[in-house]
Image (cartoon, rainbow, N blue to C red):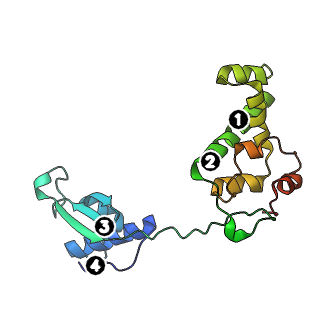
């Protein structure tokens, strides 16, 4: 089979390539539907970084367990790199060219802390016996840490999304985002960030 020049990214495109390859290899006519064709002839498809490895059963499809009669077809394939655009949110006082994005480990810590704060806040709302003291005792931390973490549950949604997407500038970690005012526009103002 000739090499495939087009980069494929979706499962549907990979499935189409597998069906086309199997039909070409077996010289099957188009009147057989894809599902029975794959069920009867394909044992395994291994998606690798540079190729698809398609393992076929014997041509009659009678015994899918016999390894002696299997055929392996390697089809060149490359995944298209992600082209999702990411912007760094820059404080208004700093020029954009000097801004660096938040470090990945700081971003992961921040996102986990936001989730933890939301979970603890929900616990306080729904469980009448819960308190910051009981959460601190269970988690092995101070009441102050519990309160600071819960304050992250009140971050503006656009700040949370920017944190998840890795668009916050370097230095916008847990310590900087704790204890911000509840009003979302004031949060951005105190951080020096334009509206997101």
Residue 19 image offset from top left, x and y in percent: 32, 69
Residue named by callout 1: 119
Q: Earlier in the sequence, mark 2 or mark 3?
A: 3
Q: Identify the element where label 1 is drawn.
A: helix
Q: Circle 3 sits on which residue?
A: 51
- Quadrant in the rendering for residue 17: bottom left
Foreground residue, 68 or 49? 49
Kindly report the distance in space between the C-alpha atoms of the residues bearing marks 1 and 2. Answer: 20 Å
Residue shown at 75%/54% (left/top)?
159
User: Could you tell which of marks 4 and 3 lies nearer the N-terminus?
Assistant: 4
Q: Which residue is mark 2?
A: 106
The residue indicated by pointer 4 is: 3
Q: Nearer the viewer, residue 85 or 123?
A: 85
Task: Give the mark nearer the N terminus: 1 vs 3.
Answer: 3
At 68% from the left and 67% from the top, the residue drawn is 98
- Relative side of 121 to 20, left or right: right
Label 1 or label 4, whichever comes before in sequence order: 4
Residue 186 placed where, x, y %?
A: 89, 53
Disc 2 and disc 4 in contact, CB within 8 angstroms: no
Q: Quadrant of residue 195?
A: bottom right
Distance between the alpha carbons at the discs numbered 1 and 4: 51 Å
């Amino acid at each position: 089979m000739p090499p495939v020049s087009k980069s494929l990214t979706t499962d549907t495109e990979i499935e189409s390539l597998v069906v086309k390859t199997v039909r070409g290899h077996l010289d099957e006519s188009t009147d057989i539907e894809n599902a029975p064709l794959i069920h009867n002839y394909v044992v395994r498809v291994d998606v690798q970084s540079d190729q698809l490895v398609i393992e076929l059963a014997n041509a009659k499809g009678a015994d899918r367990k016999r390894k002696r009669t299997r055929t392996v077809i390697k089809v060149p394939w490359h995944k298209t790199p992600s082209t999702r655009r990411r912007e760094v949110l820059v404080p208004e006082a700093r020029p954009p060219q000097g801004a660096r994005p938040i470090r990945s480990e700081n971003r992961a810590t921040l996102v986990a802390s936001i989730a933890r704060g939301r979970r603890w806040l929900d616990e306080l709302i729904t469980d009448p016996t819960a308190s910051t003291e009981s959460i601190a005792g269970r988690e092995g931390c101070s009441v102050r840490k519990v309160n600071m973490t819960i304050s992250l549950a009140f971050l503006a949604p656009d700040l949370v999304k920017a944190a998840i997407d890795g668009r916050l500038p370097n230095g916008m970690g847990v310590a900087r985002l704790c204890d911000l005012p509840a009003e979302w526009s004031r949060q951005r103002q105190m951080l020096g960030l334009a509206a997101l």
